[in-house]
Image: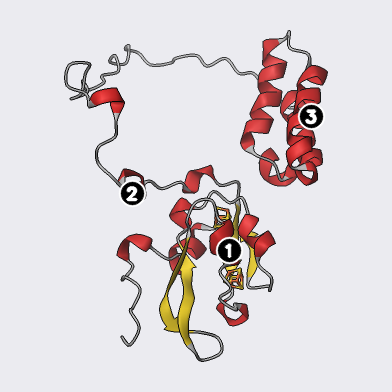
């Protein structure tokens, strides 16, 4: 809600709320740190994030939850990990490569996604170089000038955190900012898991 309205991250709203809840942290000191760090790196994002902090601080509501159950709920059970200090890989090394490919990062988005219009795309690849999360997939095909080459196949929204850097990088209007709607994502998203490998020269 607040983060979407102020074009910030939810963390900034939570930081404001936690500052308020602590009752001893000086909000001006926190804002000075935000200004010095975020303002230095991304000055264009500072204003919205400071507003989000202020709103988190001012709009915090504290509720006391009272358990109305007649019986105590069962104690939470956590299955024992198959790995412990005796059998874990050396140094905690992750030994199954590509294990993050199945992770769906959609919940980390803040209500906005890049919207792709193929008719305006010149397949320059700037979106792919810019995206920090490898959401863009190119494959061999026929490009916008009817030549064989690498063409943008689509966006895998499961890895997209909605930073919109790709929209800024796109030199045409092929990428614009839109609302993160489940139906749109389901209909227009591209799944890299089901992607065919790019075609080699000479293949049709
Ligand atoms: S940056 Fe824009 S024009 Fe270039 S490939 Fe990506 S979507 Fe297409
Ligand atoms: S919004 Fe960010 S994470 Fe999503 S596709 Fe664009 S650059 Fe990648």
Which-is-in-front pick, marks 3 and 2?
Answer: 3
CB atoms at circles 2 and 1 under 8 Å apart?
A: no
First in sequence: mark 3 or mark 2? 3
User: Which residue shows up at 40% across the image and 78% down it?
Assistant: 140
Left or right of 176? Residue 154 is left
**Residue 52 image point, x, y percent:** 74, 35
Q: Image quadrant for the N terminus?
A: top right
Outermost residue toward the bottom in this view: 146
Residue 19 drawn at (x, y percent): 70, 18
Which is more N-terminal, label 1 or label 2?
A: 2
For the point 33% across and 79% down, which residue is it? 200
Residue plotted at (33% across, 67% down): 195
- Return the mark for residue 36: 3
Q: Which one is closest to the eye, mark 2 or mark 1?
A: 1
Q: For this rendering, which residue is in front, 24 or 68? A: 24
Q: Is residue 61 visible?
A: no
Location of residue 187 (image quadrant) = bottom left
Cβ of mark 2 under 8 A from ligand 2: no
Q: Residue at x 25, y 24 (%)?
A: 90
In the rendered structure, find residue 200 and report the number of the disc placed on it. none
Task: Give the percent coordinates (x, y) of residue 50.
Answer: 78, 33
* Number of the label disc, if any, that sits on residue 127: 1
**How far apart in space, not on screen, are marks 2 and 1 (Cα)?**
22 Å
- Quadrant of res 181: bottom right
- SS under mark 3: helix
Of residue 126 and residue 186, the one placed in the foreground of this image is 126
Q: Is mark 1 within 8 Å of ligand 1?
A: yes
**167, above or below 63, in the image:** below
* C-alpha gap between disc 1 and disc 3: 29 Å
Residue tagged 2: 102
């Amino acid at each position: 809600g607040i983060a979407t309205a102020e074009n910030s991250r939810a963390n900034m709203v939570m930081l404001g709320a936690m500052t308020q809840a602590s009752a001893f942290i000086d909000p001006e000191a926190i804002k000075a740190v935000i200004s010095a760090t975020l303002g230095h790196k991304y000055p264009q994002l500072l204003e919205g994030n400071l507003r989000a902090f202020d709103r988190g601080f001012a709009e915090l509501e504290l509720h006391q939850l009272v358990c109305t159950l007649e019986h105590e709920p069962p104690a939470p059970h956590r299955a024992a990990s198959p790995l412990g200090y005796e059998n874990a890989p050396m140094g905690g090394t992750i030994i199954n490569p590509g294990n993050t490919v199945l992770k769906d990062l959609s919940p980390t988005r803040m209500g906005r996604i890049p919207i792709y219009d193929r008719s305006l795309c010149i397949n320059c690849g700037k979106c792919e170089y810019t995206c920090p999360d490898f959401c863009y997939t190119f494959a061999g095909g026929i490009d916008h000038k009817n030549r064989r080459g690498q063409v943008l196949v689509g966006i895998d929204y499961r890895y997209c955190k909605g930073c919109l850097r790709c929209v800024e990088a796109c030199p045409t209007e092929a990428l614009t900012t839109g609302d993160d709607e489940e139906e749109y994502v389901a209909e227009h998203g591209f799944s890299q898991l089901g992607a065919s490998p790019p075609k080699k020269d000479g293949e049709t």
